[in-house]
Amino acid sequence: MTTARATARARATATTAVGNLPYLVGALVVGLLLFYVLGFDEGATSLFGNTMVVHEFVHDARHVLGFPCH
């Protein structure tokens, strides 16, 4: 169904690899941090101090993804 009003359309814009680099680096850093928290944060070398809260929170996901944790 169309209306008499003009609708705004998204225009494609050309981007370069250099222009996308900050987003790629940011996504990589966030991904690696999540990978560490989910896979390797077991309390001994925790980013969050000497606590097992994060380990217990992601315990089942750790096993589903194949990380040993005991």
Image: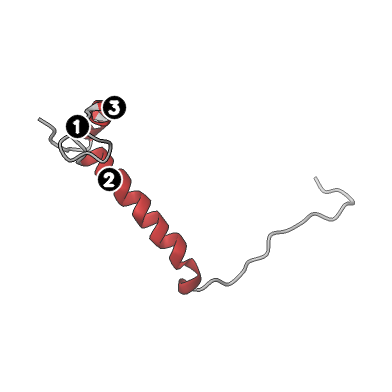
Disc ID at residue 35: 2
Q: Residues within 10 Å of mark 1 (few under 14, many from 20)?
A: few
Q: Quadrant of the C terminus?
A: top left
Q: Quadrant of residue 50?
A: top left
Left or right of 27, for residue 56: left
Say which of marks 2 and 1 sits in front: 2
Q: Answer yes or no: do the residues labelled 2 and 1 have beta carbons within 8 Å?
A: no
Q: Nearer the viewer, residue 6 or 31?
A: 31
Q: Nearer the viewer, residue 8 or 54?
A: 54
SS class, disc 1: helix
Residue at (48, 66) in percent of width and height? 20
Q: Quadrant of residue 38?
A: top left
Residue 17 placement (x, y as % from top left) = 46, 72
Residue at (22, 40) in percent of width and height? 39
Q: Residues within 10 Å of mark 3 (few under 14, many from 20)?
A: few
Q: Answer yes or no: do the residues labelled 3 and 1 have beta carbons within 8 Å?
A: no
Rounded to the nearest whole Å, what is the CA distance between mark 2 and mark 1? Answer: 14 Å
Tell which circle, 3 or 1, labels the residue nearer the N-terminal end.
3
Residue 27 placement (x, y as % from top left) = 40, 55
The amino acid marked with disc number 1 is His
The color scheme shown is secondary structure
Q: Nearer the viewer, residue 44 or 26?
A: 44
Residue highlighted by disc 3: 57
Residue 16 placement (x, y as % from top left) = 50, 74
Residue highlighted by disc 1: 63
SS class, disc 2: helix
Left or right of 68, for residue 52: right
Say which of marks 3 and 1 sits in front: 3
The amino acid marked with disc number 2 is Phe
The amino acid marked with disc number 3 is Phe
